[in-house]
Amino acid sequence: MSEPAAAGEGGALVLFSGGQDSTTCLAWALERFERVETVGFDYGQRHRVELERRSAISRGLTRLNGAWARRLKDDHTLSLAALSKVSDTALTRQVAIEMETGGLPNTFVPGRNIIFLTFAAALAYRRGLKHIVGGMCETDYSGYPDCRDDTIKALQVALNLGMEKRFVLHTPLMWIDKGETWSLAEQLGGTALVDLILEDTHTCYLGERGARHAWGYGCGTCPACTLRAEGFARYRERKDVRA
Ligand code: ZN
Protein backbone atom coordinates (compact mmCIF):
# COMPACT_ATOMS: atom_id res chain seq x y z
CA MET A 1 0.00 0.00 0.00
CA SER A 2 1.11 3.54 -0.65
CA GLU A 3 2.35 5.75 2.16
CA PRO A 4 -0.35 7.86 3.85
CA ALA A 5 -0.51 11.39 2.50
CA ALA A 6 1.15 14.02 4.68
CA ALA A 7 -1.27 15.60 7.15
CA GLY A 8 -0.73 18.97 5.46
CA GLU A 9 -2.21 17.62 2.26
CA GLY A 10 -5.65 17.63 3.78
CA GLY A 11 -7.86 14.91 5.14
CA ALA A 12 -10.57 12.89 3.49
CA LEU A 13 -14.34 12.69 3.65
CA VAL A 14 -15.73 9.26 2.74
CA LEU A 15 -19.29 8.73 1.50
CA PHE A 16 -20.16 5.94 3.92
CA SER A 17 -23.52 4.21 3.58
CA GLY A 18 -22.76 1.08 5.58
CA GLY A 19 -22.60 -1.14 2.50
CA GLN A 20 -19.78 -3.33 1.18
CA ASP A 21 -18.47 -0.79 -1.34
CA SER A 22 -18.38 2.23 0.93
CA THR A 23 -16.81 0.20 3.77
CA THR A 24 -14.03 -0.90 1.39
CA CYS A 25 -13.58 2.75 0.37
CA LEU A 26 -13.39 3.76 4.03
CA ALA A 27 -10.60 1.23 4.67
CA TRP A 28 -8.85 2.49 1.50
CA ALA A 29 -8.99 6.07 2.82
CA LEU A 30 -7.86 5.07 6.33
CA GLU A 31 -4.80 3.48 4.75
CA ARG A 32 -3.90 6.74 2.95
CA PHE A 33 -5.03 9.81 4.87
CA GLU A 34 -4.11 10.95 8.35
CA ARG A 35 -7.58 12.32 9.05
CA VAL A 36 -10.73 10.64 7.77
CA GLU A 37 -14.32 11.70 8.37
CA THR A 38 -17.46 9.94 7.10
CA VAL A 39 -20.84 11.08 5.85
CA GLY A 40 -24.06 9.10 5.38
CA PHE A 41 -27.25 10.25 3.69
CA ASP A 42 -30.72 9.52 4.99
CA TYR A 43 -33.18 9.91 2.11
CA GLY A 44 -35.93 7.60 3.27
CA GLN A 45 -34.40 4.58 1.56
CA ARG A 46 -36.08 1.23 2.15
CA HIS A 47 -32.70 -0.23 3.07
CA ARG A 48 -32.20 2.25 5.94
CA VAL A 49 -30.84 -0.66 7.96
CA GLU A 50 -27.53 -0.01 6.16
CA LEU A 51 -27.30 3.40 7.87
CA GLU A 52 -27.71 1.71 11.23
CA ARG A 53 -24.79 -0.64 10.44
CA ARG A 54 -22.36 2.25 10.19
CA SER A 55 -21.42 2.62 13.85
CA ALA A 56 -20.79 -1.13 14.22
CA ILE A 57 -18.59 -1.08 11.12
CA SER A 58 -16.62 1.97 12.32
CA ARG A 59 -16.04 0.31 15.70
CA GLY A 60 -14.91 -2.86 13.93
CA LEU A 61 -12.47 -0.97 11.71
CA THR A 62 -10.88 0.80 14.68
CA ARG A 63 -10.42 -2.59 16.39
CA LEU A 64 -8.70 -4.04 13.32
CA ASN A 65 -5.92 -1.48 13.01
CA GLY A 66 -4.41 0.98 15.49
CA ALA A 67 -3.46 3.52 12.81
CA TRP A 68 -7.01 3.42 11.42
CA ALA A 69 -8.35 4.03 14.93
CA ARG A 70 -6.22 7.17 15.26
CA ARG A 71 -7.19 8.48 11.82
CA LEU A 72 -10.94 7.88 11.92
CA LYS A 73 -12.70 11.05 13.14
CA ASP A 74 -16.21 12.48 13.01
CA ASP A 75 -19.18 10.78 11.37
CA HIS A 76 -21.91 12.97 9.87
CA THR A 77 -25.45 12.06 8.84
CA LEU A 78 -27.25 14.41 6.46
CA SER A 79 -30.97 14.16 5.93
CA LEU A 80 -31.96 14.39 2.28
CA ALA A 81 -35.63 13.63 2.75
CA ALA A 82 -36.44 15.79 -0.29
CA LEU A 83 -34.83 13.13 -2.50
CA SER A 84 -37.67 10.69 -1.85
CA LYS A 85 -40.15 13.43 -2.75
CA VAL A 86 -38.66 14.15 -6.16
CA SER A 87 -37.94 10.54 -7.08
CA ASP A 88 -40.48 7.81 -7.38
CA THR A 89 -38.45 4.64 -7.31
CA ALA A 90 -38.27 1.17 -5.84
CA LEU A 91 -35.62 2.26 -3.33
CA THR A 92 -38.04 4.53 -1.51
CA ARG A 93 -41.41 2.87 -2.19
CA GLN A 94 -42.84 -0.55 -1.55
CA VAL A 95 -42.83 -1.71 -5.17
CA ALA A 96 -40.98 -4.52 -6.94
CA ILE A 97 -37.51 -3.82 -8.33
CA GLU A 98 -37.58 -4.23 -12.11
CA MET A 99 -36.19 -2.82 -15.32
CA GLU A 100 -37.98 0.16 -16.82
CA THR A 101 -38.45 0.82 -20.52
CA GLY A 102 -35.48 3.22 -20.65
CA GLY A 103 -33.14 0.33 -19.73
CA LEU A 104 -32.53 1.65 -16.21
CA PRO A 105 -33.58 -0.35 -13.15
CA ASN A 106 -36.37 1.38 -11.20
CA THR A 107 -33.95 1.50 -8.24
CA PHE A 108 -32.49 4.55 -9.96
CA VAL A 109 -32.85 7.81 -8.03
CA PRO A 110 -32.06 10.36 -10.76
CA GLY A 111 -28.73 12.07 -10.18
CA ARG A 112 -28.40 10.67 -6.68
CA ASN A 113 -24.60 10.58 -6.70
CA ILE A 114 -24.34 14.11 -8.08
CA ILE A 115 -26.47 15.28 -5.17
CA PHE A 116 -24.51 13.20 -2.62
CA LEU A 117 -21.12 14.41 -3.87
CA THR A 118 -22.27 18.03 -3.94
CA PHE A 119 -23.47 17.85 -0.33
CA ALA A 120 -20.27 16.03 0.59
CA ALA A 121 -18.20 18.80 -0.99
CA ALA A 122 -20.11 21.46 0.94
CA LEU A 123 -19.44 19.51 4.14
CA ALA A 124 -15.77 18.92 3.21
CA TYR A 125 -15.42 22.66 2.60
CA ARG A 126 -16.68 23.40 6.09
CA ARG A 127 -14.57 20.64 7.68
CA GLY A 128 -11.37 21.63 5.82
CA LEU A 129 -11.09 18.27 4.03
CA LYS A 130 -9.54 18.12 0.57
CA HIS A 131 -10.21 14.56 -0.54
CA ILE A 132 -13.69 13.13 -1.16
CA VAL A 133 -13.97 9.36 -1.56
CA GLY A 134 -16.93 7.51 -3.06
CA GLY A 135 -17.67 3.93 -4.12
CA MET A 136 -18.95 4.75 -7.63
CA CYS A 137 -18.11 2.08 -10.14
CA GLU A 138 -18.50 1.61 -13.91
CA THR A 139 -17.77 -2.11 -13.81
CA ASP A 140 -20.76 -4.41 -13.16
CA TYR A 141 -22.53 -1.38 -14.62
CA SER A 142 -26.12 -1.38 -13.40
CA GLY A 143 -27.11 1.49 -15.64
CA TYR A 144 -26.55 4.38 -13.27
CA PRO A 145 -25.14 7.23 -15.40
CA ASP A 146 -24.19 9.22 -12.29
CA CYS A 147 -21.63 6.48 -11.44
CA ARG A 148 -19.70 7.03 -14.66
CA ASP A 149 -16.10 8.18 -14.44
CA ASP A 150 -16.85 11.10 -16.78
CA THR A 151 -19.73 12.23 -14.54
CA ILE A 152 -17.43 12.26 -11.49
CA LYS A 153 -14.63 14.05 -13.35
CA ALA A 154 -17.04 16.70 -14.67
CA LEU A 155 -18.47 17.16 -11.19
CA GLN A 156 -14.97 17.60 -9.72
CA VAL A 157 -14.38 20.47 -12.17
CA ALA A 158 -17.78 22.03 -11.38
CA LEU A 159 -17.32 21.77 -7.60
CA ASN A 160 -13.83 23.25 -7.73
CA LEU A 161 -15.00 26.13 -9.91
CA GLY A 162 -18.14 26.74 -7.90
CA MET A 163 -16.47 26.56 -4.47
CA GLU A 164 -13.06 27.97 -5.45
CA LYS A 165 -11.35 24.87 -4.05
CA ARG A 166 -9.04 22.05 -5.09
CA PHE A 167 -11.09 19.04 -4.04
CA VAL A 168 -9.92 15.69 -5.34
CA LEU A 169 -12.70 13.14 -5.93
CA HIS A 170 -11.45 9.57 -5.49
CA THR A 171 -13.34 6.50 -6.74
CA PRO A 172 -11.11 3.52 -5.88
CA LEU A 173 -13.70 1.00 -7.15
CA MET A 174 -14.35 2.66 -10.52
CA TRP A 175 -12.57 0.06 -12.69
CA ILE A 176 -12.76 -3.09 -10.60
CA ASP A 177 -15.55 -5.64 -10.45
CA LYS A 178 -17.37 -6.88 -7.35
CA GLY A 179 -15.00 -9.84 -7.00
CA GLU A 180 -12.00 -7.52 -7.04
CA THR A 181 -13.68 -5.29 -4.44
CA TRP A 182 -13.50 -8.25 -2.03
CA SER A 183 -9.82 -8.75 -3.01
CA LEU A 184 -9.12 -5.07 -2.37
CA ALA A 185 -10.61 -5.41 1.11
CA GLU A 186 -8.35 -8.39 1.74
CA GLN A 187 -5.28 -6.40 0.58
CA LEU A 188 -6.23 -3.50 2.86
CA GLY A 189 -7.15 -5.36 6.02
CA GLY A 190 -6.60 -9.08 5.50
CA THR A 191 -9.28 -11.71 6.01
CA ALA A 192 -10.30 -9.92 9.23
CA LEU A 193 -11.59 -7.02 7.11
CA VAL A 194 -13.30 -9.42 4.69
CA ASP A 195 -15.01 -11.07 7.67
CA LEU A 196 -16.09 -7.69 9.08
CA ILE A 197 -17.58 -6.71 5.71
CA LEU A 198 -19.39 -10.07 5.46
CA GLU A 199 -20.84 -9.80 8.95
CA ASP A 200 -21.52 -6.09 9.42
CA THR A 201 -22.13 -4.40 6.07
CA HIS A 202 -25.51 -4.23 4.41
CA THR A 203 -26.20 -4.21 0.68
CA CYS A 204 -29.71 -5.66 0.17
CA TYR A 205 -32.14 -3.15 -1.36
CA LEU A 206 -35.03 -4.65 0.59
CA GLY A 207 -33.31 -4.17 3.96
CA GLU A 208 -33.50 -7.92 4.63
CA ARG A 209 -31.10 -9.19 7.32
CA GLY A 210 -32.67 -12.53 8.22
CA ALA A 211 -30.55 -15.26 6.68
CA ARG A 212 -26.72 -15.31 6.76
CA HIS A 213 -25.36 -16.53 3.44
CA ALA A 214 -21.69 -17.22 2.55
CA TRP A 215 -21.58 -13.63 1.18
CA GLY A 216 -23.38 -11.98 4.12
CA TYR A 217 -26.97 -11.01 4.91
CA GLY A 218 -29.74 -10.19 2.45
CA CYS A 219 -32.80 -11.43 0.58
CA GLY A 220 -30.55 -13.15 -1.97
CA THR A 221 -32.65 -12.20 -4.98
CA CYS A 222 -32.68 -8.39 -5.38
CA PRO A 223 -30.12 -6.88 -7.83
CA ALA A 224 -27.85 -5.72 -4.98
CA CYS A 225 -27.79 -9.16 -3.32
CA THR A 226 -27.22 -10.88 -6.68
CA LEU A 227 -24.22 -8.65 -7.47
CA ARG A 228 -22.77 -9.11 -3.99
CA ALA A 229 -23.23 -12.92 -4.08
CA GLU A 230 -21.75 -13.26 -7.59
CA GLY A 231 -18.82 -11.02 -6.66
CA PHE A 232 -18.08 -13.04 -3.54
CA ALA A 233 -18.20 -16.29 -5.55
CA ARG A 234 -15.71 -14.85 -8.09
CA TYR A 235 -13.43 -13.68 -5.25
CA ARG A 236 -13.49 -17.18 -3.69
CA GLU A 237 -12.81 -18.82 -7.08
CA ARG A 238 -9.79 -16.58 -7.74
CA LYS A 239 -8.52 -17.26 -4.22
CA ASP A 240 -8.82 -21.01 -4.80
CA VAL A 241 -6.95 -20.73 -8.12
CA ARG A 242 -4.12 -18.81 -6.40
CA ALA A 243 -3.94 -21.23 -3.47
ZN1 ZN B 1 -31.58 -8.30 -1.38
Image (tube, grey):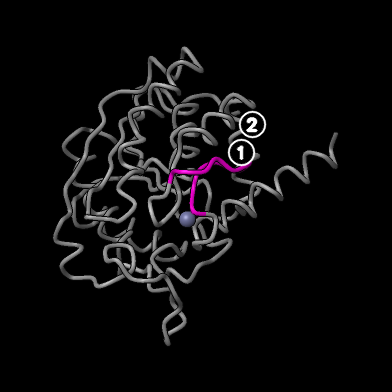
- The residue at 25%/59% (across/down) is 115
Nearer to us in this view, 139 or 31: 139
Q: Which image quadrant: the N terminus?
A: top right
Q: Badge 2 is on which residue?
A: 187
Q: Badge 1 is on which residue?
A: 184
What secondary structure is the stretch in magenta mostly built from?
A: loop
**Residue 211 in magenta stretch:** yes
Relative height, residue 69 to residue 113 (above, below): above
Nearer to us in this view, 202 or 25: 202
Task: Residue 233: give its label.
Answer: none
Q: Which residues are magenta?
A: 209-219
- The residue at 40%/16% (across/down) is 69
Q: CA distance from mark 2 to mark 1?
A: 5 Å
Instruction: Identify the image quadrant of residue 61.
Output: top left
The 10 Å Cα crowd at callout 1, few under 14, some 14 to 19, many 20 or more, is many
Whole-percent x, y for residue 12 in the image? 35, 34
Nearer to us in this view, 94 or 53: 94
Q: Are marks 2 and 1 in contact (CB under 8 Å)?
A: yes
Q: Which image quadrant: the C terminus?
A: top right
**Residue 113 in magenta stretch:** no
Relative height, residue 82 to residue 97 (above, below): above
Residue 67 falls left or right of residue 156: right
- Tell me the SS state at disc 2: helix
Whole-percent x, y for residue 214 in the image? 63, 41
Counting the numbered discs, the total is: 2
- Tell me the SS state at disc 1: helix
Nearer to us in this view, 138 or 5: 138
- The residue at 36%/35% (across/down) is 53
Q: Amino acid at mark 2?
A: Gln
Q: Amino acid at mark 1?
A: Leu
